[in-house]
Image: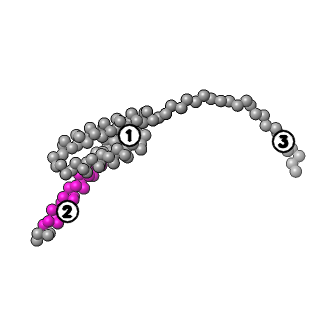
Amino acid sequence: MNTNYRKVPPRLEPETRFDVRSESAAPFRALQETELERLKHRLLRERLAGTAETELSAPLRRAANEAAALAWITAVPLLVFPVLFEEKARTALFQAARQEYIRERSRELLAA
């Protein structure tokens, strides 16, 4: 056995307490949610006004909702949303144009 082994009794200081005021982040997030919804509606209105075809309304609304959902899980949803919406809207319009091309091509093939 080690001859230098010596049991050291612990010395405990008096317990220190801190007063912590918990301020909920909920009001801030609620404000952000409201601002995000306003931004979503404004950008969607602008995009729909620039689109003549009414059948593109549903894909653009879906793109706006998807972009808002993705933006909401980031730290800065109001900064991220416009870029996400633009990307999702571009993809939705491309897909709608592709579907229309396939429909037209199918009609031609069936008519022949």
Compared across the picture, whether 17 is left or right of 81 comes to right
Q: Between disc 2 and disc 3, whose residue precedes?
A: 3
Mark 3 Cα-neighbour bin, 10 Å: few <14, some 14–19, many ≥20: few
Magenta stretch containing residue 96, yes or no? yes
Whether residue 24 appears in this view of the structure is yes
Residue highlighted by disc 2? 102
The image's mark for residue 7 is: 3
Residue highlighted by disc 1? 77
Mark 1 Cα-neighbour bin, 10 Å: few <14, some 14–19, many ≥20: many
Magenta stretch containing residue 88, yes or no? yes
Give the distance between the C-alpha atoms of the residues marked 1 and 2, in whole angstroms. 36 Å
> Which residue corresponds to the image point at 34% horizontal and 44% vertical from the top-left?
68
Q: Secondary structure at mark 2?
A: helix
> Which residue corresponds to the image point at 29% horizontal and 48% vertical from the top-left?
63
Which amino acid lies under the numbered mark 1 shown in the image of this protein? Pro
Q: Secondary structure at mark 1?
A: helix
Count of numbered labels shown in the rendering: 3
Q: Which span of residues is magenta-colored?
A: 87-108
Mark 2 Cα-neighbour bin, 10 Å: few <14, some 14–19, many ≥20: few
Give the label, 2 or 3, closer to the camera: 2
